[in-house]
Amino acid sequence: MHEDLSAWAERLARKHLRELPSRLKHVEGVARQSRRIAGLVDDPTLLVAAAWLHDIGYAPHVVETGFHPLDGAEFLRTQGAPDRLCALVANHSCAHVEARRREVSLPWPDERTALRDALWWADMTTAPTGKTVDARDRLAEVRERYGPDHVVTQSIAEAASEILEAVDRTESLRHAVT
C-alpha cells in the first residue's frame, strides 16, 4: 500500500458503501469522531482508517457470513490491509459477544488498547445519521432498531457495560489532555 492508510481506507469505504448511503453517513461520522481524538492514541492514522472501515462488512458484495465485523475483516485481509486493522474491524464495539451468540469465530485478537477503545467510542457516539450522540442513547437506538428478540439487541444488552467502559476510558483520556 503506497498511499496513506487513512486515505486508502476512506476511498475503499466510499467505493464499497456507496450503495448504502445511510451506512456511509454513519461511517463518515465515525471517521469525523475518530479524527477528533486521534492524537490520544499510538497510531492516529490507524484509528481513522479503522473508523472508515469498521462497517465495510455491510457492503452487499462483501457479505459472506452476514456478521459484518467478520465479513469486513476478511474482505480487508484480501485487500492487503494490515493485520492490526483487520483485528480492529473484526472486534469493533464488542463484536466478540455477538460472534459467540452467532457461533462464529473471530480469528483476530481484541487488542484492548486505548486505540481500540477510541474506535468503540467513535462508533458508539455516532448515530446512523452521522450525528454525534451520547453512547447510552446510541445503545438504546440499536436496541429499538433491531427489536427485543434480535441477536444484535441481545448482544448489545450483554456487552453494554464493556462498551460503556471503553467509552468512559476514552472520555477520561479526552478530559486528561484538555
Image (spheres, rainbow, N blue to C red):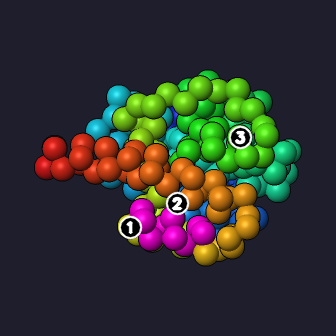
Element under disc 3: helix
Gap between marks 2 and 3, in whole Å? 29 Å
Element under disc 1: loop
75 relative position to 112: left or right:
right
Residue 104 visible at all: yes
The local crowd at label 1, few if under 14, some if 14 to 19, many if 20 or more residues have their Cα within 10 Å, is few
| Between marks 2 and 3 in the image, the one whose residue lies nearer the viewer | 3
73 relative position to 82: left or right:
right
Q: Which residue is mark 2?
A: 28
162 relative position to 152: left or right:
left
For residue 21, above or below residue 2: below
| Between marks 3 and 1 in the image, the one whose residue lies nearer the viewer | 3
Asked whether the beta carbons under mark 2 and mark 1 sit within 8 Å of each other, the answer is no
Relative image position of residue 61 (x, y in whole percent): 85, 51
Who is closer to the viewer here, 72 or 94? 94
The local crowd at label 2, few if under 14, some if 14 to 19, many if 20 or more residues have their Cα within 10 Å, is many
Name the image quarter holding residue 137.
Answer: bottom left
Residue 8 visible at all: no
The three-letter amino acid code for the residue at tag 2 is: Glu
Q: Which residue is mark 1?
A: 134
Task: Give the extent of the magenta segment.
Answer: 135-143
The three-letter amino acid code for the residue at tag 1 is: Asp
